[in-house]
Image (tube, rainbow, N blue to C red):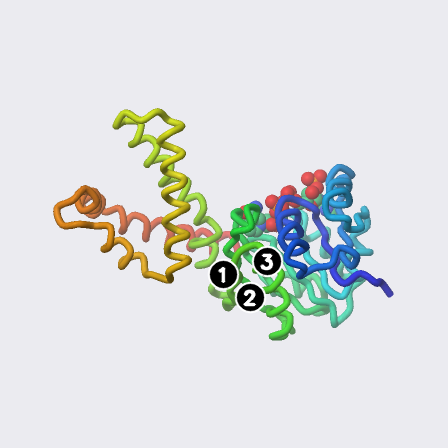
Amino acid sequence: MTNYQLGVIGAGNMAEALLRGALAAKVLDARFVLVSDVSPARRDLFTREFKVAAVDDNAAAAACPRLLLAVKPQIMPAVLETVARVINAETLVISIAAGIRTAQIAAQLAGRGRIVRVMPNTPLMAGMGATALAGGAGATPEDLDWTGRLFASCGIAVVVSEREMDAVTAVSGSGPAYFFYLLEAMTAAGQAEGLDEATALQLAIQTCRGAGELLFRTGQKPQAARAKVTSPNGTTQAAIEALDKAGVKDALVAAIRRAAERSRELGS
Ligand SMILES: NC(=O)c1ccc[n+]([C@@H]2O[C@H](COP(=O)([O-])OP(=O)(O)OC[C@H]3O[C@@H](n4cnc5c(N)ncnc54)[C@H](OP(=O)(O)O)[C@@H]3O)[C@@H](O)[C@H]2O)c1
């Protein structure tokens, strides 16, 4: 019997970000977390920064009542082979591996364990992740609630059905890249209009950050917020008309649809 409440396999970037948020929010207690990773440098970092126990023993982590799988998808089959030998029917298995369905995990675990699949995104590393979670075989409402609280310590967490995960992947998983793309364009345009690159980038980043925060805090719909900053015949109206004429909204919808299709292709 282990005293640890949560085992983590894979002490990478996502696990680091998650532990930082969850320990600070006291959703986790470092004394009851056991991390396993192949890399001595990562184990040292977790011991030093988070005061958690860190080992090179996936079976020890898998013996905990809750288990977070945070390795790359291509490593998952080998990790699940070890996990399958150790877990019991009551183990909560949380996977953040992109594109791996709960049915695949359940099959590898020979039906043991209760499975929750999670799709976070990279802003989790800044404590502002958008995470979706879906219950698989045997997952209870309490499992979803606990997992949701864990990820909400680094942003927000919403429960979806697993068939919605491709849409989630397309909207919030790949979403940060759409923002980066927009920022590239805003910066280039600022430069073309005479700003230096650093100033244009600084203004563009803070504008996107502030616009998101404004909607988050006020609960306004984007259309309503846009109407507020668009005076008749003003600069914003001129810009939006140019965007509409170029079909930018349709292009974005098509791009996100394509991302969802690609997610389905990769998962099938
Ligand atoms: N980054 C994202 O935006 C994002 C979003 C959604 C989901 N995810 C998912 O999150 C998961 C983790 O991503 P990440 O960016 O945190 O990856 P990462 O930084 O590469 O972390 C994975 C860690 O696992 C270690 N590892 C490799 N093989 C292992 C084994 N057999 N047993 C134990 N540990 C092992 C790696 O060590 P080595 O480096 O020495 O191999 C590394 O420290 C992935 O499945 C990814 O699909 C990521």
Tell me residue 17's x, y (percent). 62, 48
Amino acid type, label 2: Ala
Q: Are marks 1 and 2 in contact (CB under 8 Å)?
A: yes
Nearer the N terminus, badge 1 or badge 2? 2
Tell me residue 133's x, y (percent). 55, 63
Q: 172 or 154, which lies in front?
A: 154
Query: Which residue, as the protein is rendered here, is positioned at the far right?
Result: 1
Q: 144 or 137, which lies in front?
A: 144
Q: Are marks 1 and 3 in contact (CB under 8 Å)?
A: no
Nearer the N terminus, badge 1 or badge 3? 3
Q: Which residue is mark 2?
A: 134
Amino acid type, label 1: Met
- Judge depth for marks 1 and 3 and give the one in front: 3
Q: Residue at x 63, y 44 (%)?
A: 13
Q: Which mark is residue 165?
A: 1
Q: Residue at x 35, y 33 (%)?
A: 187
Within the image, what quadrant is residue 1 found in? bottom right
Q: Which residue is mark 3?
A: 153
Answer with left or right where residue 60 lies relative to residue 248: right
How many C-alpha atoms fall within 10 Å of the one at disc 3: few (<14), some, or many (≥20)? many
Q: Residue at x 75, y 37 (%)?
A: 41
How many C-alpha atoms fall within 10 Å of the one at disc 2: few (<14), some, or many (≥20)? many
